[in-house]
Amino acid sequence: MSDAPGLEVVGVTKRFGDFAALSDVSLRLHPGTVHALLGENGAGKSTLVKCIMGFYHADAGELLLDGREIKVGNPRDAQQAGIGMVYQHFTLVPSMTILENLTMGLGFRPGRIDWKVERAKLTAFLDTMPFRVPIDRPVSSLAAGEKQKAEILKQLYLQAKLLILDEPTSVLTPQEADEMLGLIRSMATAGQLTVLIITHKFREVLAFADEVTVLRRGKQVGGGKVSELSVPEMARLMVGDQASRDHAGREEREPGEVMLALTGVQALDDAGGPALQGVDLTVRRGEIVGIAGVSGNGQTALVEVLGGQRRHQGAVTVGGEPFGATREEIARHNFALLPEEPLRNACVGRMSVGENMAFRSFDRAPIGSGVWVKRGALRRHARDLVERYNVRTTGIDAPIMTLSGGNVQRAVLGRELSGEVDVLVCANPVFGLDFSAVADIHGQIVAARNRGAAVLLVSEDLDELLELADRILVMSGGAIVYETKRESADRQSIGLHMAGHA
Amino acid sequence: MGGFARGSLGVLLPPVLAVVATMILFAGFLAAQGVDPLTAYRLIWLGAFGTWFSWQDSLVRAAPLLLTGLCVALPAQMGLMIIGGEGAFVLGALAAVAAGLAAGNLGLPDILVQVIMAAAGICAGGVVIALCGLLRFKRGVNETISSLLFAYIAIAVMNQIIAGPMRDPGSLNRPATRTLPDNLMLGTIPGTTIHVGLIFGIIACLAAYICVYFTKFGFAARIVGGNARAGRVVGLPVERMILAFCFAAGGAAGLGGMVEVAAVQGAVSSDISTGAGYTGILVAFLARMNPLAIIPVAVLLGGLDAAGGLLQQRLNLPDATMLVLRGVLFVMLLSADALQGRLTRYLAPRRLPVTV
């Protein structure tokens, strides 16, 4: 088993509509090395490996395996070429044992399964492996680290020589992560494997990778031997080093009184783990406060708390009064919220565009009148917003789920900003949108600030924050760990705090 | 842009296909027993809607179905699937009789006592279904299962009470409550044999339809039912709205029970569990959970019910024949629902090109 392959990715480009997720990305994996793919969320790491695995078809570029060009049309092709991938989330069937899972992974074979033979085969295989897992216990009874090992073993059992790991340590404790990565590293060093590992943790890159490639906004921005790079250099590559751009529409103004304040806010995630661990922040009138952070550090829970979608402890006040996200409070304080994935979080997909645009105002004049919803007023309101916010739809009666993502975003932003706004919360408002839509939506957010709204902008895109925000807070591990003014913002320190490395 | 008018071809096609498939299959079933399907279908038509007499019979049978259909269709607006209408129906009947017997001696005007009976029926039914809603969001208990189990409990409780505390000592053969005095029984629509319960049912369906599609409350309900996360973001009291809808749903079925006992049976015995609550599930599904569509569907199923007697008489078919028909219809309907997704995709307006 000393046949680790080399892989070369040459000039891969992948577009989704007008949006280029990858442009002309190349990287070279040397046989028997661990190669790290580093980048912020949305930098294109997942898109790249999905192109390698055949989930996506690249618009341009080629793959060379040991110098020969290969065509990967689907994940099965990739498996046959000896490329295996371990996903961020577990894919083994929880109620079955590892023996059953791994045997099943070999593919469908008609007839009876001879478990004695299968067991002997698997045991013989495991004897050649540096790590061990209990093969007769149901997967659901295993710890996260063991499950992750089993996922890796499954790929190796399927004859993978080139292993792609997508943020494999995000569900592991630091000790489990070190053990697992150490074993992978030793297999690579022994020439049994070539590994591509997606991560945004510098610590793991430094400790376990031989080489690194950094992606930013779909472009390959640098890389090389890990031994020749320093953490600040990698941080600079990852978050970029251009001077922060001032948004064109920004007016100089002094922030006013505190409109939104969180004190010691704590919340649990869906699995019952801690998502927010004592968040304190304030947002004043006429300022945009940006929340930076690698996704999964509590930003989603923060927005859910503000939107009344998640229970919490600690105080949230708006305009100096306790805020529980009731309809009455939302209306009284002119509170607006643009959550991420608006179709999932703020719309009813099968209701019409017009109806969705009335979610804030259906119970107030002119749309609401007595107990009734006035259809005529609802339609006028919708037509007006569709025009003002440039929503492309076949009509206001079309179900909102038939709109493209950017147009859903515009429709919801129009709904939220159509009235007076004193507090505005936005989460990744331009995620996946093209350039003109981005400029449009940024303009609306800055305009709201200029009118005196207090804006909390949660974003995984540091450039967006540096362009729009007056102050930037960095969130890591469910708490605010760093704060800086825009004028004195330093990408490197922000990047280091984001990566939990400071 | 009302709800029914919005029923595009994609929404209406599955139930229509289901009815056609049912007629074909049922024809085979009849033929296998040596009965000419065409004769049978003519008789069904005759027994259901052929004469004024059969029309009246059909409408009387439709009355409770209107109300039990709402017991399924209203929670469905909130995304809840309640199938325990029978329990609310039975408890509604029992509470109405208890209220009527108790209040009847107070010297109140008859109409007031009848209102009290209706209120008792509505509350009894409403509380049962509201409890299912409460268990759903407080404890994550599946409301479909809990409502069904509550129906069993309700029927058992009813049997217990009519055999114990409320038993009429004069009824020797089998347990039953005392009979309501004639002055408390609901009247008929003048010139017909149809009791006023039909009017209650139609009013309830119209009110539910108007509420869901034209009022602020209904608009809020459609947001919450369509996507509870969105409901929270726009500040709607999701839990309270679910409770309100469950109460209204159970109240409708409870009112159905009140009508059954105060217009037809006069006393509660084990006969009160007529299966109207379960047939209501079929009604609501056929009506695609639209309160307005419940009206014609309930009349149709009332008609099938009414035709059973004629079929038995003329063709010597067993009583259960109509149950077979109903069962086939339900299975076909559920199968057609599986088709729904594919049909709507096929008939849906083309997505806009994916540009932003």
Image (tube, coloured by chain):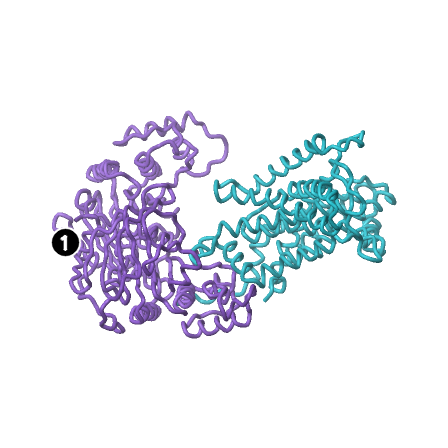
Chain colours: A purple, B cyan
Q: Taking B59 as reference, is A178 left or right?
A: left
From the viewer's perspective, is B214 left or right of B196?
left
- Residue B71, horizontal then vertical, whole percent: 63, 48
The reply, left or right, for residue A102 in relation to residue A24 is right
User: Relative to the observer, which residue lies in front, A311 or A498?
Assistant: A311
| B87, above or below A43, in the image | above
Which residue is tagged 1? A232
Give the structural element (helix, strand or loop) at label 1.
helix
Subunit that carries the residue with mark 1: A
Residue B275 seen: no
* Residue B275 or residue B203, whichever sits in front: B203
State the residue lying farthest toward the top.
A116
State which quadrant residue A114 falls in.
top left
The quarter holding residue B266 reads top right
Residue A40, placed above or below residue A386 = above
The foreground one among A278 and A96 is A278
Residue ID at (20%, 46%):
A205
- Give how far across and how far down residue A160 sits, in percent: 32, 41
Q: Residue at x 38, y 47 (%)?
A: A311
Q: Amino acid at mark 1?
A: Pro
Task: Give the x, y percent position of residue A496.
Answer: 18, 52
Residue A200 in sight here? yes
Q: Give the image location of residue A173, x and y in percent.
A: 26, 38
Label 1, residues with CA under 10 Å away: few <14, some 14-19, many ≥20:
some
Placement of A163 over or under B297, stated as above or below: above
Which quadrant does the N terminus of chain A fall into?
top left
Dividing the picture into quadrants, the one containing residue A289 is: bottom left
